[in-house]
Image: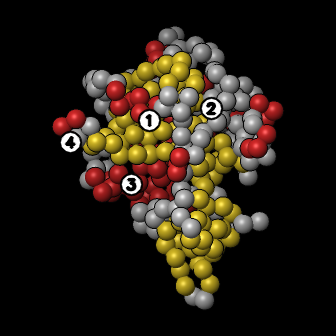
């Protein structure tokens, strides 16, 4: 399989079916996550909030084989693929950083996914601002991070992730077949989802356990892997369209565009960003 996340523990075996015990056994730190797996749920981002808080040191994660109301940014629908082919999950976490820094979670989750995907050569993942990962010129993963208020006024961060793992090109909807890909398509081999899921959670544990001051170094790593740097892009903010060349990321991960005439535009977010061909 060529993955640096294969485990040799006798309690972990390569398998197609995802189950909480196997994912937990494959983790580097078994106490980091409270892991739950379900066949079907409306939205993992909503359902993970209903799970009990245990003794986990990082957070709670809910994997689902199917989502009936899964969503991406701005209400877009995420294609989940055939059951037992991809990874659909949400993590409920409370990073020990100031609440103002929680806006970094999309970027940091992208970094964790990048590191996990790099364990499956020849995959060479790139991060498309603000919340997608690409292999080549096709999307392989999307992220939706939200801050939710729970009982007692406590805030939780919820990070939703979809990754195309074993779905094949002809199984993708026709309208996205030329825009999306999967890890299996790029590596040419079937991917063990248990080992891959554990690898993602391990990388995410490392990042979420780091101090807020580490963000500058993490952002520098992201910059080196950014899909659109140096490319002409079109960003949509409501009815407003901004065009320019992506030249940098700001100190909090903002998109910096050169819009011509010696002017720059800094985008904290956007409804849609496309690379202009």
Compared to residue 65, the image places residue 90 above or below, namely: below
| Drawn side of residue 210 relative to residue 70, left or right | left
Between 95 and 77, the one nearer to me in the picture: 77
Q: Which residue is mark 4?
A: 153
Can you tell which mark lies on residue 45? 1
Q: How is the image coloured?
A: secondary structure
The answer to the question of whether label 4 and label 2 lie on touching residues, with beta carbons closer than 8 A, is: no
Compared to residue 11, the image places residue 156 above or below, namely: below
Q: Nearer the viewer, mark 4 or mark 3?
A: 4
Between 3 and 157, the one nearer to me in the picture: 157
Q: Which residue is mark 2?
A: 80
Quadrant of the rendered image containing residue 32: top left
Q: What residue occupies the far front of the structure in this picture?
A: 239
| Drawn side of residue 116 relative to residue 99, left or right | right
Residue 43 percent coordinates (x, y) = 48, 32
Looking at marks 1 and 3 on the same chain, the residue that comes earlier in the sequence is marked by 1
Between 143 and 240, the one nearer to me in the picture: 240
Distance between mark 1 and mark 4 Cα atoms: 18 Å
Write the residue at 60% across / 89% down. 261
Q: Is residue 93 visible?
A: yes
Distance between mark 4 and mark 2 Cα atoms: 32 Å
Write the residue at 69% across / 36% down. 183
Q: Which residue is mark 3?
A: 103
Write the residue at 68% across / 70% down. 232
Write the residue at 52% across / 76% down. 265
Q: What residue occupies the far bottom of the structure in this picture?
A: 261
């Amino acid at each position: 399989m060529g993955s640096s996340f294969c485990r040799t523990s006798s309690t972990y075996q390569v398998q197609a079916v995802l189950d909480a015990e196997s994912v937990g056994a494959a983790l580097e730190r078994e106490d980091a996550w409270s892991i739950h797996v379900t066949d079907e749920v409306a939205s993992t981002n909503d359902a993970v909030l209903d799970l009990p808080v245990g003794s986990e040191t990082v957070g709670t994660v809910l994997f689902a084989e199917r989502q009936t109301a899964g969503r991406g940014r701005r209400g877009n629908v995420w294609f989940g693929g055939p059951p037992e082919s991809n990874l659909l999950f949400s993590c409920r976490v409370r990073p020990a950083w100031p609440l103002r820094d929680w806006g970094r979670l999309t970027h940091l989750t992208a970094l964790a996914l990048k590191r996990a995907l790099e364990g499956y050569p020849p995959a060479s993942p790139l991060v498309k601002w603000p919340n997608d990962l690409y292999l080549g010129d096709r999307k392989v993963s999307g992220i939706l991070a939200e801050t939710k208020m729970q009982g007692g006024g406590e805030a939780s961060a919820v990070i939703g992730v979809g990754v195309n793992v074993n779905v094949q090109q002809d199984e993708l909807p026709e309208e996205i077949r030329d825009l999306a890909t999967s890890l299996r398509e790029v590596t040419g081999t079937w991917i063990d989802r248990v080992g891959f899921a554990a690898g993602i959670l391990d990388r995410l544990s490392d990042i979420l356990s780091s101090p807020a001051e580490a963000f500058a170094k993490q952002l520098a790593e992201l910059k080196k892997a950014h899909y659109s740097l140096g490319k002409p892009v079109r960003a949509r903010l409501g009815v407003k369209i901004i065009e320019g060349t992506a030249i940098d990321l700001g100190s909090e991960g903002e998109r910096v565009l050169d819009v011509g005439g010696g002017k720059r535009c800094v985008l904290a977010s956007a409804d849609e960003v496309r690379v202009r061909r």
